[in-house]
Amino acid sequence: MTHNIKNYFSSIKHTIYALLIFLVLWWILSIMYPPYIIPSPFSVLRNINKYIEEDFFHHFWLSIYRTFAGFLISLVLGTLLSLFTHSSKMQSTFLIFLALFQVIPGTILGIIFLILSGIGSLTPIALVASLTISTVFINATNVLLKRNENLEAVIKVFDGKNGSIIKYLLLPTLVPITRSNLTLGMGLGLKVVVLGEFIGSQDGLGYLLNVARIYFQMDKVFFYLIVLLLFMVLYEFFINLIFVIFFQKYLYGE
Amino acid sequence: MNAIEVKSICKSYDKNTVLKNLSFDVKKGDKIAIFAPSGSGKTTLLNILSKIDRDFSGTFKINLPFSVVFQESRLFPYMTLLENILFGLKLKNISITDEINKKIEDWLTVTSLKGYEKYYPYELSGGMKAKVSLIRAFIVNPDIILLDEPFKSIDINSKQNIIEFIKQNYPDITILLITHNIDELPLIGGKILRFSKSPLEDYKEIQIESNMTIPELIEKLYKIN
């Protein structure tokens, strides 16, 4: 427990360092370029009140909701598909299929979903789900392929059936990769949602970014970037904390 | 009544034959040791009898409920010592009665594991893990137990105590011990099938007493040739 809590606080410390490095690099670039291309971090931070307009939080939470909804679908479906294909020994076929599916550019899928469901929440949600499911499935399947066969033998020796193998071996084996999927996949999902909203939406952070771009408000663009960055950092802290508190025993290898 | 019947089992890895027409029977209540050199195919035989390895020819029957102690401790890393001990009971849907709790207490005392119940495997030594694996297999009260070098990483004093404990508490259990260690044989005090080389095929049957000393065992095992 202590070891994992130490690791947790150490990761917070390193994230703060990374954010500081990001701010320093941004500041250096802002010195090199005019403020209408790269505004200084100080001026953006000073004007935060100005950027948080009345409907900002509406757009912000909409993007977060779309990301969560899309990613949750992909996490559940990807993990279940991985467990199913593992149990039915079809994982190799699905691994190749989803690896090929991953090659399809997001913009093509975005256009298809846009035609199918129009402008609204469904398009970005479907886009996130379809673009992150391969990663979730491939990660989970690779972990399951490397499962501990010795422990599987123990379960069988004590008359355990497939249900027991899933409950006592496969699901616990998936815990560390689920944590990683929840953080990395969510980051990827957020990027996809913003991109989807940027291309074809009338709300969400991607839409705000597009408006700011049209009016050449680079300070706003950087503000939204900071908001996304801070959200991801806080989200990662939260997920890691949840795992350290509730799933610590499954992180024995770390 | 035969507890285990093995008939003409053959097993090869590519061109390397490790089991060749191996046949033997173990009667209910018998204590039998398969005594053979390292790398001769003993663990392969145990994997076949445990139904883990199904790629072989020949037949075998295990006619009573059995349990296995593997060469490695094979503990679940996300379960505490006590959870690992109770794991077999849980899978077999055996309720934990006062009698079982008392038996666990006795096992923990004899293996000096009392106080470590909430420890996870990564906090235990190799010997401690091997003891947990033994308890896990015995606590389900099987009629037959298959043991693959179960005392390999257990110190000599603990080993003696555990062997005495098993003899006293499980007098009727059928034991099939697979080993190349002479000092594990006193657990048997029965029949030894001594194989001298790989593949496991022909063997000599040797009867030993459980109170024999190691020098006496060596004399008995090797004089027969």
Image (cartoon, coloured by chain):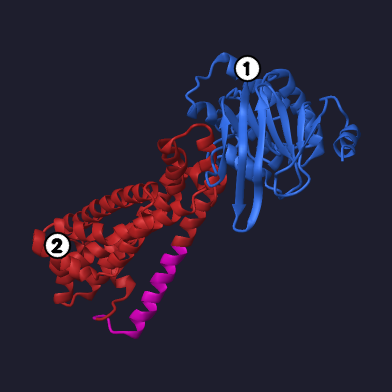
Chain colours: A red, B blue
Q: Chain of mark 1?
A: B
**Toward which corner of the image does residue B66 lie, by quadrant?**
top right
Q: Is residue A22 magenta?
A: yes
Quadrant of the frame with the N terminus of chain A: top right
Q: Which residue is mark 2?
A: A113
As helix, strand or loop, the secondary structure at mark 2 comes to helix
Q: Residues within 10 Å of mark 2 (few under 14, many from 20)?
A: some
Residue range of the region highlighted in magenta in the rendering: A16-36
Q: Chain of mark 2?
A: A
- How far from the left and from the top, in percent, is residue A149? 52, 47
Q: Amino acid at mark 2?
A: Phe
Task: Work out whether B121 lies above or below B191.
Answer: below
**Toward which corner of the image does residue B88 lie, by quadrant?**
top right
- How far from the left and from the top, in percent, is residue A130? 24, 59
Q: Which residue is mark 1?
A: B102
Q: Is residue B74 magenta?
A: no
